[in-house]
Amino acid sequence: MSNGRSLGSGGFKPNGSLSNIIVVVLVVVVLILCAGVFLMYNNEKGANNDAAAAKQAFGALNDSYNDLSGKYTALVANNADLKERFDQLETKYDNVSTDYASLKNQSDTMTVKVGEFLESEPTVAYNYRITSSLGANNTSDMKLTVNVFNVGNSDVSSVLVKVTIQSLADNSTGELVRTISSIPSLSSRSIDFTLDNSTRVQSVWVNIN
């Protein structure tokens, strides 16, 4: 004879609180799985974004490299051109230097020869010529041109030119006197006298004042 309760024909049945716990656990598991999937998606999306940004940065870097490479190539070409021009200028400079040295040597030689030719004292030489010219009222005149040359090695401050003339009308004589100022060494000056056709030039005289 027993005092215990019979379990009945249906066996053991869980109560409602255990079922709720199982449901909560399943929900938590599902949430954890969702969170994991979301994190994996975000990480993959971030990685894709980083890859795209890296690809864009690499493209920009490649463009910069190509630009610098082009500029470097142009710079090398310009440098080669400048070097060629410099070499040409250097060659021309050397030629000019050689020509200058040659000309200087010739100039020095000429200076010595001219120095040997020049008079040590102030000296002038002269010549003159007579030509016909048309004067006032269409009358024919004579022009006497006297050329004076300084053949000394120093400048001449003043030269006196004296012309003796004779009138063919009455055989009278006279003098025409002019002054030429400042004739440097190895230089010349000219002076003109206008005469009528009835005049004859007897003499021309030039002297240093």
Image (spheres, helix red, strand yellow):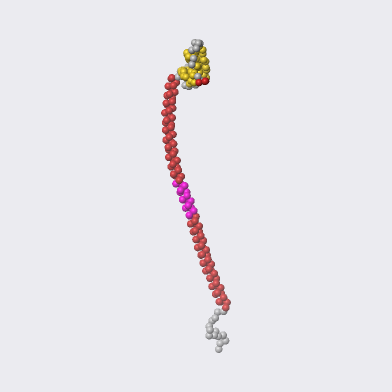
Which image quarter: residue 1? Answer: bottom right
Whether residue 90 is in magenta: the answer is no
Instruction: Determine the residue positioned at 44% across, 27% down.
Output: 104
Q: Is residue 95 left or right of residue 193?
A: left
Where is residue 85 shown, x and y percent of the image?
44, 39
Where is residue 83 shown, x and y percent of the image?
44, 40
For residue 70, above or below residue 105: below
Farthest-out residue, bottom? 1
Is 16 or 205 nearer to us in this picture? 205
Is residue 27 in view? yes
Q: Main secondary structure of the magenta part?
A: helix
Stretch in magenta: 58-73
Is residue 147 in view? no
Whether residue 72 is in magenta: the answer is yes
Instruction: Determine the residue positioned at 49% across, 14% down.
Output: 198
Instruction: Determine the residue positioned at 43% across, 28% down.
Output: 103
Instruction: Determine the residue positioned at 47% across, 21% down.
Output: 186
Where is residue 11 shown, x and y percent of the image?
53, 83
For residue 39, above or below residue 78: below
Where is residue 189 shown, x and y percent of the image?
49, 21
Is 32 or 176 nearer to us in this picture? 176
Total numbered circles:
0
